[in-house]
Amino acid sequence: MTQSIDIPPTRRLPADELARMVDDARRRTLDLTRDLTGDRQFGPNLKIVNPPLWEVGHVGFFHDYFALRTLHGLSDYQQSDAERLYDSSSIPHDDRWDLPLPTMQGTLDYLESVRNAMLERLPETGEAGEAESYVYQLTVLHEDMHAEAFTYTRQTLEYPPPEFSDGVTAPPVDGHGPLEGDVHVPGGTHQLGSDDSVPFRFDNEKQPHTVEVAPFAIARAPVTNAEFAAFVEDGGYDRAEFWSDDGWQWRRDRQQTAPLYWRRGSDGWEQRWFDRWVPLAPHHPVCFVSLYEAEAYCAWAGRRLPTEAEWEVAASRAPTADGSGLEPGKRLYPWGDTPPSPERVNMDGHRLGCVDVGALPGGDSAFGCRQMLGNVWEWTSSLFKPYPGFEADLYKDYSEPWFEEGRRVLRGGAWATRSRLVNNNHRNYFTPDRNDIFAGFRTCAL
């Protein structure tokens, strides 16, 4: 029997749609981990990754805890020691390599047991209840986040690129090359965050609130590899005047002289892409850069990072006919309210990497900004803080523990992000030193 639990207002979804989402997320998890055998099931103890064998089990535990125990009221986990092994809130990161974990097959059996129990409890036909619609989406989107983490873990550990079995083939990209110039965005009043019209809201997107945004100019596209290489070749990593104090200390501690995974080859810059070195694609967005590197580039270029409010305005608003103001209302996605498709965005992993910043014009915002969703996450200058009126939702540890860590907000999603996860309101957040994630940036005029 479904428990009575406190959930935010949620659009009810057909039960078969929820079941497809559960199976689609699980297929992606298996595709990303099925070839991890032997030592690759654990990998080295690094603070930026989890042992893959543990992380697979944690994905199952999250469904088990929230969908089966919290929502459906089951008294026992589908694996008796699941909480002791997989509860990320109580198991310190470094301890995850020393736990008596089941084999990979045993772990997958646990996930299958959880999946079967979840689907058995959905209605056979018609819409699921509001609580089921919320909780099943929450657990699926959590698994989607871990799928992206598995992807950048494979990059970090030099494993081969994944192979996906969903049968989806992205069409050839429309457009190539760079996309230069700024768009000018008039100032005005903006409702920052997600209201009840957004189909699924995370707690850190609430409550929507009014902010005033001054006029600004923002780049049509993210900074490219070629543009960032000019900064590197001008001695940007050796010139302290471009770096914040924390950024300069980070650069010195890491002895960083270029973006992570770059090296000079006989014919120019190369980049490691999973387990192979390839020529650096000049018009792809720069990726695997920290906030510190983004800030240093901006100082060198005479630019700045956007705030998250500016980013959201450029992504979600439309100009008035005379261009002097903002039309009322917000778009859910840069192009409108139609869900993402491969013709508009580079997401869902189907292209297995970035595309040129000039590609996919069908995904432009009303102001003409391209790829505000997909390709790379984009750093903003904003600290990850609660919006006014914030209250933690069912998953209490999703946002609240991280507000005081100095994390920065990233927007937009990357090529490996599942498209059902993000819209113009979605807030990602990482500490400013992280350069292992699929993150780049776009700039604003000073």
Image (cartoon, rainbow, N blue to C red):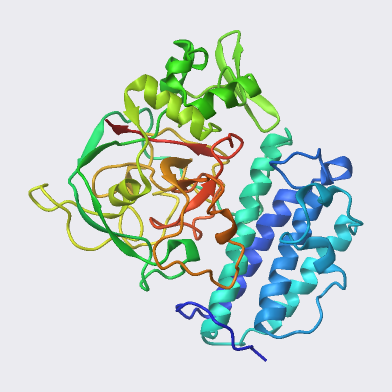
Q: Is residue 10 left or right of residue 4?
A: left
Q: Residue furthest top?
A: 266
Image spot of residue 349 (x, y percent)? 57, 47
Q: Quadrant of the C terminus?
A: top left
Spot occupied by residue 115 in the image (x, y as percentages of width and height): 72, 72
Question: Which picture quadrant has residue 262?
Answer: top right
* Residue at x-position 45% and y-position 30%: 294
Q: Is residue 202 something one can see in this rendering? A: no
Left or right: 194 with respect to 263? Answer: left
Residue at (72% x, 80% y) in the render: 69
Q: Please provide percent x and percent y for residue 59.
A: 71, 61
Residue drawn at 76 percent across, 73 percent down: 114
In the depicted view, which residue is nearer to us: 93 or 422?
93
Q: Nearer the viewer, residue 391 or 366?
A: 391
Residue 178 visible in rendering? yes
Q: Is residue 398 left or right of residue 178?
A: right
